[in-house]
């Protein structure tokens, strides 16, 4: 996958905001993510150390998204898709 393909996929993902214009020094900074639920991605580029690799800068409020909100969103998916069998 190229960096352009990854950028296109990520820009369509729910909860992801792509900020990727390195020529203008426009990429996510931790201060932007504070107190938000979104995950910000930028500086998407080919990894020169791996033939099939990509590198990117990912920023999120780890307290909100990493600890609390992420657990709630996973639970909602599990419930909505009936992934836990009925134990009656």
Image: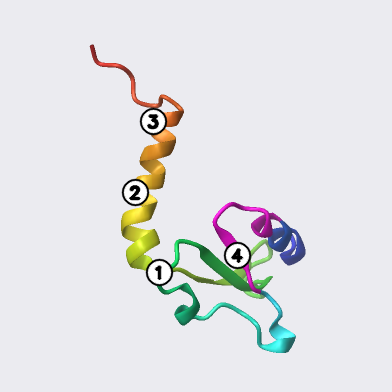
Quadrant (top left/top right/bottom left/bottom right) for the N terminus: bottom right
Residue linked to disc 4: 17
Residue where numbered disc 2 is placed: 71
| Residue 36 marker | none
Which of the two labelled residues, at mark 2 and mark 3, occupies the earlier sequence position?
2
Q: Is residue 31 inside the magenta stretch?
A: no
Tag 3's secondary structure? helix
**Dot 3, crowdedness within 10 Å: few (<14), some or many (≥20)?**
few
Please tell me which of labels 4 and 2 falls first in the chain: 4
**Labelled pair 2, 3 in contact (Cβ < 8 Å):** no
Local crowd size for mark 2, using a 10 Å CA cut-off: few (<14), some (14–19), many (≥20)? few
Chain-order first, disc 3 or disc 1: 1
* Of the image marks 1 and 2, the number of the one nearer the N terminus: 1
Magenta residues span 9-19
Mark 4 vs 1, N-terminal side:
4
Q: Residue at x 31, y 58 (%)?
A: 67
Q: How many marks?
A: 4
How far is the residue under mark 3 from the one under mark 1? 25 Å
x then y, percent, for residue 19: 64, 73
Residue 29 spot, x, y in % from top left? 51, 81
- Dot 4 falls on a residue whose secondary structure is strand
Which residue corresponds to the image point at 36% horizontal and 39% vertical from the top-left?
Answer: 75
To which residue does mark 3 refer? 79
Q: Residue 88's quadrant in the figure?
A: top left
Do callouts 4 and 2 mark residues in contact (Cβ within 8 Å)?
no
Query: Where 74 sits versus 80, above or below?
Result: below
């Amino acid at each position: 996958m190229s960096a352009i393909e990854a950028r296109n996929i990520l820009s369509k993902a729910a909860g992801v905001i792509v900020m990727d214009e390195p020529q203008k020094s426009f990429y996510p900074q931790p201060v932007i993510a504070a107190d938000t639920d979104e995950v910000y991605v930028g500086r998407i580029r080919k990894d020169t150390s791996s033939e099939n690799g990509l590198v990117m800068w990912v920023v999120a409020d780890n307290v909100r998204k990493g600890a609390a909100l992420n657990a709630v969103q996973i639970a909602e998916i599990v419930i909505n898709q009936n992934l836990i069998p009925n134990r009656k």
